[in-house]
Structure formats: structure tokens, C-alpha cells
Amino acid sequence: MLYEGALLAVLVVWWFLRDWRATLVAAAALPLSVIPTFIGLKYFGYTLNTVTLLALALVVGVLVDDAIVEIENISRHLRMGKSPMQAALEAADEIGMAVIATTFALVAVFLPTAFMAGIPGLFFKQFGWTAVLAIIASLMVARLLTPMMAAYLLKPTSETEQKDGWLMRRYMTTMKWCLRHRILTGIGAGIFFIASIALVPLLPTGFVPAADRGQTQINIELAPGSTLQETALVAERARVLAMQVKGITGVFSSVGGGSSGDAFAPGASAEARRAVLTLTTVHRTDRKESMAQLEGTLRQRIAAIPGARFTVGPPDSGVKMQLVLQSENPVTLSEAAQKVTRELRTLQGIGNVNSTASLVRPEIIVRPDFARAADLGVTAASIGETVRVATAGDYDTNLTKLNLPERQVPIRVKLPDAVRADLDAIARLTVPGKNGPVMLGTVASITMESGPAQIDRLNRSRNVTLNIELGSRTLGDVNKEARALPSLRNLPPSVTIAALGDAQEMKALFASFGLAMAIGVLCIYGVLVLLFKDFMQPVTILAALPLSIGGAFVALLITGRALSMPSMIGLIMLMGIVTKNSILLVDYAILARQGGMERFDALVDACHKRSRPIIMTTIAMGAGMMPLALGWGADPSFRSPMAIAVIGGLITSTLLSLLVVPAVFTYIDDLEKLPAWLRRKWQGRQ
């Protein structure tokens, strides 16, 4: 993706400049910016991994931006009849403040993300630093190397200033109308922003998009007490049915975990009844169905197998939602979990719903008669020791070892399976007493009952985990519908919902991103205040931020992407990118006014001179991210939403900022003049 994006960005430069020398100068900024980034990554101890390469792929369009602005301005000065050396010096001096401001605005956005907490912070630490290092390197290249290369590589041109085309003439007419009708322009921008916010409820939400790596899993769980042979039989039936699904190319089966396959053996009881099928599919480009649709077909096929429950989908892949109920009362907790499970299964579009409390296993319950045991000199510890050794065998450390030439084999002595299921036989076991052996049935009652297959605790309270397969739906939508179920809205007072799982992480994600965005805006404002030495005009530059949100949301809505971690990354990146356009306009307008031009003429000249580099940088950035948005290469589930959000926001922010920012500039300029106007009024009255 890095190479394709870089190539497209360079082609955009050539398309606009139509000069291979200027294109070469701009293209040289890419490797000259990436190589120092690698040095910085080495210093920080980072590696070339998915996160760092993703950061480079996303900023590849940004890396060439500063060079585009520099080379376009130098080309414009060349058309004025200047020599390459003079054009490079004067153009670099003219554009210097704007280039520095745009770069530090991007740094101000990305740097706070490197200090985020929680799971997002683990991801963004390397992502943020990689982006910052690359952007700073691109600034150094644009300010130091690009003008020097242009001075020696570019040739003087006999071309004069080009006449405006129909598109430029139409834009200038529209822009002048917006300046003369700035109230209507402001109202229109406000309506667009409100409409953008109104799109938020329409967007699906999630934590991490479900991946499509060409593999999935079927987790099989039989009833407690099932043997390894029974598990293998069910796994084989599931394998045969899975191979009949179109798109499945291979299945690897892993059955059981205990070497003996004995459900009563310590360490093997939890594994003998479980199996995992790892399925390999054809490449996503060679099949019509998505991975979610393929997993839905698998669920339908294997649902006919009795005596087991199945979970389809790899673990920790964004395809499952967890709901954890917690209580001190196990009976109330079990009843509430069963009721919630029944209602969850009524939700449309989801897969299986499994509960850790839904399976029970047979248990031998031994209730000592303490008075009778005391009379016969039998302790509760000796009763427990006798029952444990007879049913499960002794501890591994106490087992006798059979010494073979190459290994030792532990010898476990216990009752045969048939005897262990006979309560009368267990009652006839002898227990050591003070006055001699005593039959177990004499000092205890023995019954066969059922109990939970496992007891989970959270903060010393019992809990039940409900696993909900999302199917083709998003985490946010399923979580919203689940929380609206009567069983969850009317839980018993002693039962609470624990803050665990992806739903809670998604909530923390949005909170972290909200804080990161707020800090980013403040950092951008602070940087611009320091660079422009003005507290008001940076507000004009920040006016472009609301204009980008609508485009990002519309792009996500059209493509069916969820508002999740990757799309939030795109929104943060968008904050820094869209300020570049405003900075180019405002910086030139300020320079023009300092040169003696009137406000209206300065804004018109700024829009005329800077619209071309703004369009060039926007298209270059969009072209650089297009391979990510189109899903070229490996699994695009995480990368594609980022690029889609950025491209959508770039389109609207560029089109609208070229019209709205000049109008906002006039309002801010009037506010700056307000204190002086009030002072004159006050002095006039006196």
C-alpha cells in the first residue's frame, strides 16, 4: 500500500505541473522523508510492524504535501520571468510560514494520540510517533532540500501566467458571492455542520472491525462428562459439513486436551469435551461472500448436530460481544442469566448466544454427619481424602512413578468407571477412624446431584458471561438492542452488569478519542497563535474542522463502515490535514494585507493564488490513501475505514473551506477591530 499510494501521489503532481523536473523534485520528498523516519524508529526501539507501516501508508500523501506547496509556488514565480535561483529563494521565503504552520498543526494532532491510555493507547503509541517523525522529516526536506533541488534542476520558462480556466472562473465568481453574502454563507455552513452531527445516530458503531484473513474457527463444546471419543465423533461430523460449504479449502481438527481422555482426570476434564476446527478459505477476492456471510452459512450447517454447542469465528477478532452478569446470590444470578439468554436469542441477525451458566455436570455430593463422625473418630479431612483418591486419584506429587529407560510414567490408582457411578459402592469405601476403619456410608450421606460446569468470580462475586456472536451486525447496534431488552432493564437488585468486554472498551475508546480530539484542537490553536502572533486569526483556520466531519460521516455511511477505532483514527488525522488548506489561505491573505491590499482584494488574491496548491495537495493525499480505501493488498478491514473517513472529509472540507474560510476571515477581522471601534466611540462621547 505504501508503494501504490506514493506512486499515485506523484502522478497527481505530474498531472498538475506537467513538468517532469518539478515532479522529480516533489517525488524526492517521499524517500527523503521516510528514511529519517526509519532512523527515528530505530532510536525509539520500534520495529517495522503492522502499526508503523500503517502510519506510513496513511501519511504518504501528507509527506509530499509540503514539497507540492513549495514546488508549485516556485513554478508560479518561474512563470513571472524569474531565474530558478531567484524563484526558489523568493517562493520559499513567501511560503515558509504556511509550510511550518501546517506541519506543526499535524504534529499537534498526532502527538497527543501517542499518550492515550488503555487498549487504544497500546496501538497509538507507535502509530502516533511514527506519523510525527515522518511529518517532521517532510518539513525538513521541504524547507531545506526542495528549494535547493528546484534551484538547480528547474529551468527558466518563457511561459507567462496562465489564463484562468472555466473552473477557476466559476470558483472565483462563487467565492466573491460568498464574501459579499457572508451571512448566508455562515448560515449555510452552520446548517451543514448540524446536518453532519445528525448523521451520527445513523452510523453503526463498533470497537474493531471483524477481520477477514482467510481463516476462521469452529469451537465445539460438549456436555460435561463427555469422553474424548464422543468429542472426536462430533468434531468429525462438523468437519464433514464444513467441507461441504463453498469457499472452504481445508479444515484442521484439534480434539481434547488430556492425554488420557478421562473426564475425571485432573487437568483433562475441561478439555476432553472440547474441540477446535480451524478452517481455511479461499482468498477474499476469489469469493463473493464476506467472512461474516461464510460464518453464517457454517452456523446453519452445523446447527443440526445434536449434543453440542458451537461458536463460529476466531477469538478476539471483533465478531463477538460479551455481557457479564455479577451477583452474590448464585440462584438469582442463574435465573437472571437464563432469562437474558432467552431474550438475546430473539435479536435479529446475530449468531449463537452461549452462557457459561447454561451447562451443568453430575456431581457426587458427600454430606458428613459430624456428630456420628465425631463419635467414631472420623475427621472431615479424611472423608474428603478418601473420596478424592477413589474418584480422581491422588495428587501428581504423591503418585508412584514407573521408571522407564527414557521417561517416568505416573501410576494413578482409582476406582473403575462403573464403580464410580455406583453410589452404594462409594458408600462401602472405608475411612480411617480413631478406633479403626469405618464405612463411608456410616458417617456421611451420598447423593448424585447436578451443579454448574464452572464457577467464575469477579471481585469475589460470582459472574456469568454471555457470549453473543455478532454475525454480520456491528457491536454498537447489538449492544444498544441488548441493553433495551426487558430482562436487562429490570434485573434483580442483587444482579449487576460488569464493565467488561469489547462493549466497555468501545465506550472507553470514544471517551479517549473525544479527549484526544479536544487536546488536538487546543494544541493546533496554541501552535497557530505562536506562529501567527495573533489570538483571533487561528480561529479562522479552525473553522475548517466542522466542515470535514460531514464528509467523513457520509463516506462511512455510503460504504457501510462503522464508526470504530480505525475510522476514529481517520477523524483525528483529518483534523490536522484540513487545517492545511485554511493556513495556506489565511497566511497569504495576511501577507497581502501587510503589502497594502484591501481586505476584499487580499482574500480574492489569496483564493486565486492558493486554490491550485490546495487542490493539488488534497488530490495527492486522497490518491495516496486510495489503495487503502479500495482494500488493495492484505486484509483491509482495519485500514479501509481510516482512509474512507479521511477521503470523505477531505472532499467536503476542501470544497467548503475555499468558500467559507474567506467569509469567516472577515468576521474575525471585524472582531479584532471591535475594541478599537468601541474605544473611538467612547472617546467621541467624552
Image (tube, helix red, strand yellow):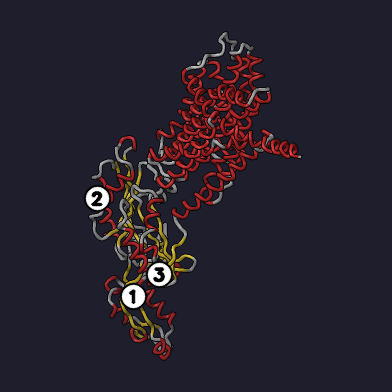
Q: Position of residue 193 (x, y in %)?
A: 49, 40
Drawn side of residue 159 relative to residue 489, left or right: right
Q: Indicate which disc residue 492 carries.
A: 3
Name the residue nearer the viewer: 592 or 336. 592
Q: Residue at x 58, y 37 (%)?
A: 542
Task: Decide: few, some or many residues near mark 2? Use Cα within 10 Å; few <14, some 14-19, many ≥20.
Answer: some
Drawn side of residue 349 relative to residue 639, left or right: left
Whether residue 50 is visible here, answered yes or no, is no
Task: Decide: few, some or many residues near mark 3? Use Cα within 10 Å; few <14, some 14-19, many ≥20.
Answer: some
Mark 2 or 1, nearer chain start = 2
Q: Residue at x 34, y 86 (%)?
A: 442
Q: Where 496 falls versus 684 (above or below)?
A: below
The residue where tag 1 is placed is 364
Element under label 1? Answer: strand
Q: Indicate which disc residue 301 carries.
A: 2
**Label 3 vs label 1, nearer the camera:** 3
Locate the N terminus by quadrant.
Answer: top left
What's the amino acid at mark 2? Arg
Q: Residue at x 47, y 42 (%)?
A: 194
Q: Where 298 falls versus 450 (above or below)?
A: above
Decide: marks 3, 1 in contact (CB < 8 A)? Answer: no
What's the amino acid at mark 1? Ile
Locate the C terminus by quadrant.
Answer: top right
Mark 3 or 1, nearer chain start = 1
- Residue at far top of view: 158
Whether residue 579 is visible here, answered yes or no, is yes
Name the residue nearer the viewer: 40 or 4. 4
Mark 2 and mark 1: Cα distance apart in space: 37 Å
Q: Where 79 falls versus 111 (above or below)?
A: above
What's the amino acid at mark 3? Pro
Q: Indicate which disc residue 342 carries.
A: none
